Image (cartoon, helix red, strand yellow):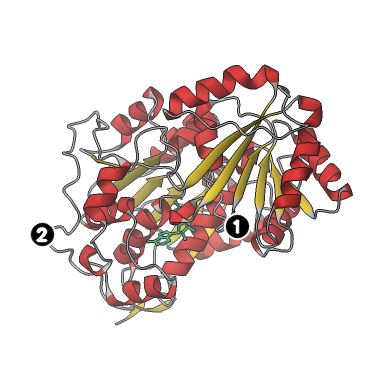
Amino acid sequence: MTTTTKRGRTRTAAEPAPTPAETPAAPAAPAAAESAPDATGLTLAQAEASTSEITFADLGLSGPMLESLRRAGYVRPTPIQAQAVPLALKGRDLMGLAQTGTGKTAAFTIPIIERLIGGPARTRALILTPTRELCQQVEESIRKYGTGTGLEVISVYGGVGYDAQTTALRNGVDVIVATPGRLIDHLEKQNVIFDDLEVLVLDEADRMLDMGFAPQINRIVAQIHPYRQTLLFSATMPPEVEALARKYLRRPTVVQVGRRSQAATTVRHYVYPVPGHKKTALLRHLLGEMKADDSALVFTRTKSGADRVVRDVTDAGFAAEALHADRTQAQREQALARFKEGQVRILVATDIAQRGLDISGITHVINYDVPQQAEDYVHRIGRTGRAAKEGDAFTFMSTDEIGMVRTIERVIGQEIPRISVAGFDFGT
Ligand code: AMP
């Protein structure tokens, strides 16, 4: 089928979107709450057990989409995909409680692509995310699964010039992936209108609210008509997110993978007791023990701390890059690209990189500083052990961080084994 669009673009629809099977292949998701969604989803173990036999074909996807997923090397849907995709294809509002690393991005990009292919070329889907990095990842995901569909996607975020975004928006795109602040700027300049918008995704809603984006989100959603499909994803469910869901979702189905705060199961955690002044030496020691193709994401509390660690490990002969908010967008992109391509095996980041970063194959997450929030621990270590690969999470604990580690252990419901390295442990 060939569609000539109102913008003069010609698009070949790969295949009309299928009507999802009425008998859902996925396990019954928890019943929809009337207005206040309640998080009575499956635990990770249950979800994995009940979805392990499901194939992508069972989800009611089109031939070209199945081909894209095959090309991506995916054998089976992850539990969040198995649950969310059939419901989203039916047009349901969804609340996905899942952290990054569970395959949640594809859980919403796949049904969006299926919905849009072959349809009119208008801006029909908007995905709001908290950070530029996440914007780029979602955009990449749409390009990857939407290969050959002719769908046009743009990501819109701050820290870069307006011109390219303005031109792209004015020419018209099918899908916009945006951070709330920059999108408001474009709305004010009337570079984009949402009259034809059908699907709204609020990705990492908890993170967006943490970052103070509630007013911007409210202003954006006010411009979108209520007969849309709204999908909200969040790693945690604080009352603010619940309130957002109650306001914007209509009879949502709650899909949950993993209990709140549950750490990824494929990650081995260890705590290294070490006095603060010996942390760098311990880091160098551990980096020296890594295998040639291992890679480490090191988290520090401050931007200057990240720069200092990069200098120290570079002096010791390890190639490392820093990723934090004081670096320019170009520097951040370059650091990330060099790390992703394996040119450097060590990326030192502040919490800017904590969530959402999709870098596959990280073998080590090292908390040079103990995170200030227990939830952040879960997100940081979610950078390793992604999509069922195994990983190690090392946390350096100085004497004044013992209390914080105990809090983290309470929240994740497990004790983290201590590793004592002679000469480093403050107990030795
Ligand atoms: P996300 O949770 O969306 O950040 O995805 C985590 C990682 O899992 C990404 O690298 C995806 O490419 C990958 N992924 C997503 N779905 C699957 C799947 N069904 N099988 C294997 N890997 C997947």
Give the number of the disc on residue 410. none
- Residue 263 in the image, given as x and y percentages of width and height: 45, 38
- Residue 255 in the image, given as x and y percentages of width and height: 27, 43
Q: Horizontal placement of 338 versus 108: left or right?
A: right
Task: Locate ligand 1 by image quadrant.
Answer: bottom left
Q: Specify whether tag 1 is near ligand 1 (CB below 8 Å).
A: no
Can residue 405 be seen at all in this image of the molecule?
yes
> What residue is disc 2 on?
23
Give the number of the disc on residue 165. 1
* Residue at image point 25% right, 32% down: 37
Can residue 180 be seen at all in this image of the molecule?
no
Q: Quadrant of the C terminus?
A: top right
> Is 63 above or below relative to 230?
below
Residue 70: which quarter of the image?
bottom left
Three-letter code for the amino acid on which mark 2 is drawn: Thr
User: Would you call the spot at circle 1 few (<14 residues within 10 Å), some (14-19), or many (20 or more)?
Assistant: some
* Residue at image point 30% right, 44% down: 45
Three-letter code for the amino acid on which mark 1 is drawn: Gln
Front position in the image: 14 or 51: 51
- Residue 145 in the image, given as x and y percentages of width and height: 42, 68
Q: Horizontal placement of 110 versus 393: left or right?
A: left
* Residue at image point 52% right, 65% down: 171
> Is 290 above or below relative to 353?
below
